[in-house]
Image (spheres, rainbow, N blue to C red):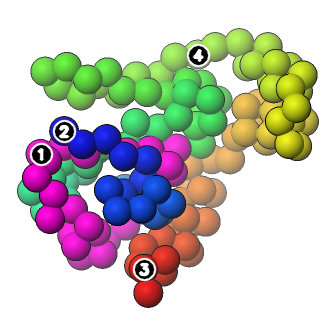
Amino acid sequence: MLFCHATPQNENDIFTRSTPEDLLLPLFEVLDAAIVVCGHTHMQFDRMIGHTRVVNADSVGMPFGQPRADWILLGPDIQFRHTPYDLVNAADRVRNTNYPEAEDFAARYILNPPTEQEMLEIFTRVELPANHK
């Protein structure tokens, strides 16, 4: 099992559940790992890329889609989990930090995150191989 932020080669690569496999094969077929757990795009998925199972764990603090904590439980199998939490309290805690643009972040990403479909449309415009040319 290999853990990485985006892809094993680059922490900023963008790919989603709908990125064509032929674009991803060069990044994953060289690995000696049966499972890769990644994140970066903040949307859960579980897919095969060649012979490698690639799972996006999502995000606890900034999932796209429903406002909640999304995560995975690793064991004999991989279980996608979703945990509701006090979003108003979380937003207030962010607002009370020195985080740049804390108010905007709290409103946009904690209380009213973009939908998965909105983010898939944005990510499709900037996904691989655009940043590998």
Q: Nearer the viewer, mark 3 or mark 4?
A: 3
Q: Which mark is residue 1?
A: 2
- Residue drawn at 52 percent across, 44 percent down: 42
For the residues marked 4 and 1, what is the alpha-carbon distance in whole angstroms? 31 Å
Residue that badge 3 annotates = 132
Question: Tag 3 or tag 2, which sits nearer the N-term?
Answer: 2
Residue that badge 4 annotates = 84
Is 103 left or right of 64, judged from the image as shown? Answer: right
Q: Indicate the amino acid at tag 3.
A: His
Question: Which of the image's four quarters has the C terminus?
Answer: bottom left
- Residue drawn at 63 percent across, 36 percent down: 62
Residue that badge 1 annotates = 34
The reply to whether callout 1 and callout 2 are in contact (CB within 8 Å) is yes
Instruction: Assign a secondary structure to mark 4.
Output: loop
Question: Tag 1 or tag 4, which sits nearer the N-term?
Answer: 1
Q: Is residue 45 above or below residue 69?
A: below
Instruction: Assign a secondary structure to mark 3.
Output: helix
